Image (cartoon, helix red, strand yellow):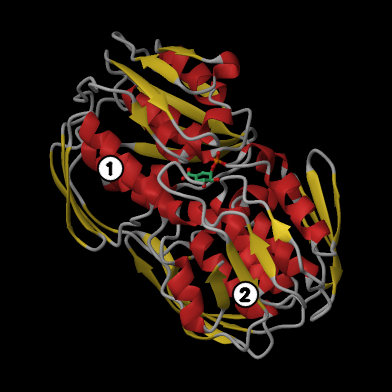
Amino acid sequence: MSAHGQPIPMTARASGPLTGEAAVPGDKSISHRSLIFGALTVGETRITGLLEGEDVLDTAKAMRAFGAEVTRLGPGDWSVHGVGVGGFSEPEDVIDFGNSGTGVRLVMGAMATTPIAATFTGDASLRKRPMGRITDPLALFGARAHGRSKGRLPLTLIGAADPVPVTFRMTVPSAQVKSAVLLAGLNAPGQTRVIEPDPTRDHTERMLRGFGAEVTVEKTDEGNLITLTGQPELRPQKVAVPRDPSSAAFPVCAALIVEGSEITVPGVSRNATRDGLYVTLLEMGADIAFENPREEGGEPVADLRVRYSELKGVEVPPERAASMIDEFPVLSVVASFAEGSTVMRGVRELRVKESDRIDAMAVGLRACGVSVDETEDTMTVHGMGAGAVPGGARCVTHLDHRIAMSFLVLGLATRAPVSLDDGSPIATSFPVFEPLMTGLGAAISRD
Ligand code: S3P
């Protein structure tokens, strides 16, 4: 069960055609950043379309604990009165980030160059996840961390009193690490540099620029060189959060495998650093049209029209992994219904997400009759073709929202129903998943 509730067993059954509009909620990455950047700005930042999932609500609470005034004005409509760069005050109590790796890692970066102490914890999933990847670069600024073995939560971070700027070469392709370093660099004098060999989502760079910071990105032989000029005065913004392509992936993939389906998904971000699933699905033969391309909230967006498709297996190259890192679980579901094998390379980061996602999907898919091979860094799904996946298993969620939603999508097109031990983690990122999917015609129910 999630940190916030009781376990919710769920089942998905073979469904008739999915039809209608899937208006998915706001982007999780941009929602976290809107609250954090708003809190680092003097004046009022107004946010519309904020994702009101548990992960983002935990970040809102954390920003209040550091001294910002964060108010919900209406559905998705929020106001943040920030305290300015370097203005965080010391929280009075432990900050519980629930299931949210993004929230805790970005906020650790945001406080690391302010001379205050804060103690962070999370649910059983978050307490297992590696934090050394964040606290090691933050130590270069002068911050000190005291956590459990291997740097795990609960962890106390003591911000640097006299921060120095840092040049950091990333060793794992992680936008969370990049963002934590850039956020720490905000309150360090001079220029903080991040060298990013494999590009990851660039919302932090785009939004920091939007809030008035000086951020440049140069392509070099070593990868992207991102340079931030420290101690800017951030200006309050109006942020319109676009819809989340990672949440859109679930209705899109469901429509591709349920015969006769045709759905639309309006206003989905098409940021190239988030687009890998859609590139891959098109290569597999998916019928997806990108209509009305336009810009919203500083991001390229389009309306998606998706029709049921007969798919073929493909090779997903390692250099594409970062741009679809959250979509591999649901891709492995779609790949089960394709003709031929789908090989996903360069995916070792999946092993340190909310669960070990390679293992969680491999075990559940095998229990549903699909043959899956895995190595430390690859996953191969041997597709059975449309209509040929047996299903009939109870899959384990491991406190992971994307594992839960992926298995529910699977059960919409298998011969026998697929059930889950616990659908409650879905509320962390996609609280309206169940009504949205059943509204399209999906046979998903609570047991
Ligand atoms: C995120 C980055 C990704 C992603 C997560 C959101 C972000 O994690 O899995 O859901 O908002 O920066 P990594 O940066 O660790 O790959």
Residue depicted at 40% across the width and 10% down the height = 142
Residue 254: which disc?
2
Q: Residue at x 79, y 81 (%)?
A: 387
Q: Is mark 2 within 8 Å of ligand 1?
A: no
Where does the image place residue 11, in percent across and percent down from the top left?
Answer: 61, 68
In the foreground, 64 or 137: 64
Q: Residue furthest bottom?
A: 260
Q: Quadrant of the C terminus?
A: bottom right
How many marks the image carries: the answer is 2
Q: Is residue 212 visible?
A: no
Residue at point 37% right, 63% down? 242
Q: Quadrant of residue 144?
A: top left
Q: Which element is circle 2 on?
A: helix
Q: From the viewer's perspective, is 245 left or right of 276?
A: left
Q: Which residue is mark 1?
A: 60
Tag 1–tag 2 contact (CB < 8 Å): no
* Disc 2 residue crowd, few under 14, some 14–19, many 20+, Cα 10 Å: many
Which quadrant would residue 27 be assigned to in this image?
A: bottom left
Where residue 163 appears, as percent x and y from the top left, is 34, 13
Tag 1, which secondary structure?
Answer: helix
Observer able to see residue 321? yes
Rendering coords of residue 328 (x, y %)? 67, 55
Cα–Cα span, label 1 and label 2: 32 Å
Mark 1 / mark 2, whichever is N-terminal: 1
Q: Amino acid at mark 1?
A: Ala
**Residue at point 24%, 23% (across, down):** 91
Amino acid carrying label 2: it is Ala
